[in-house]
Amino acid sequence: HMDDDRGSDSGSAYVFRVASDGTAAQTTKLTAFNGAAIDVFGMSVGVTITDSQGSALALVGAHKADPGGNSAAGSAYAFMLPADVPCHECDVGFRSNGIECVNIDECAGTPCH
């Protein structure tokens, strides 16, 4: 959560997959597409498996983000993590990968891509 990819302490979260032999490997680094300094993205993370192939939905918090100019109001980002392809970001209420995500059901139903 203290990475500086999008400014000092903008934050990030890492995705690891565990193979059948028990070894783990990092597959993806998540950042907020609109991240800024001191957002502290990645301080809070929740993940749920969405199907039998191992796809997942990750919710990542940025508790000091400034959405809509509201200082340190915080933001939550939803990421679809398909089992066999790189993740697609779906940030509720913002444009992501050229598609606007309106609600969490839209994110959970299909990746925004």
Image: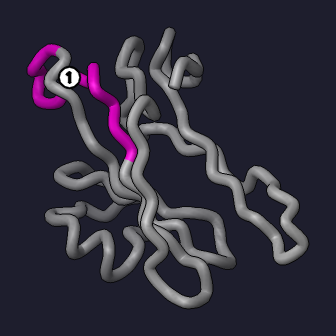
- Residue 107 % position (x, y): 30, 69
Q: How many marks?
A: 1
Q: Is residue 12 visible?
A: yes
- Vertical comparison of 50 with 87: above or below: below
Image quarter of the C terminus:
bottom left
Choose top left, top right, bottom left or bottom right for residue 36.
Answer: top left
* Along the line of sight, the residue nearer the viewer: 17 or 72: 17
Residue to which mark 1 is pinned? 66
- The x and y percentages for residue 39 are 35, 21
Does 20 sit above or below residue 25? below
Residue 96 appears in the rendering:
no
First to last magenta residue range: 60-71
50 lies left or right of 86: left
**Color theme of the render:** one colour
Identify the residue shown where x is 56% and y is 90%.
Answer: 52
Q: Who's the residue at 30% across and 52% down the image?
A: 91
- x, y percent for residue 96: 35, 55
Secondary structure found at label 1: loop
Q: Is residue 36 left or right of residue 28?
A: left
Residue 102 in percent (x, y) is at 15, 63
Q: Examine the structure image and report whether residue 74 is included in the region drawn in magenta.
A: no
User: Foreground: 51 or 77?
Assistant: 51
Image height of 2 relative to 88, above or below: above
The stretch drawn in magenta includes residue 69: yes
The amino acid marked with disc number 1 is Asp
| Residue 53, picture quadrant | bottom right
Residue that appears at 21% across and 29% down: 74
Give the image quarter of residue 67.
Answer: top left
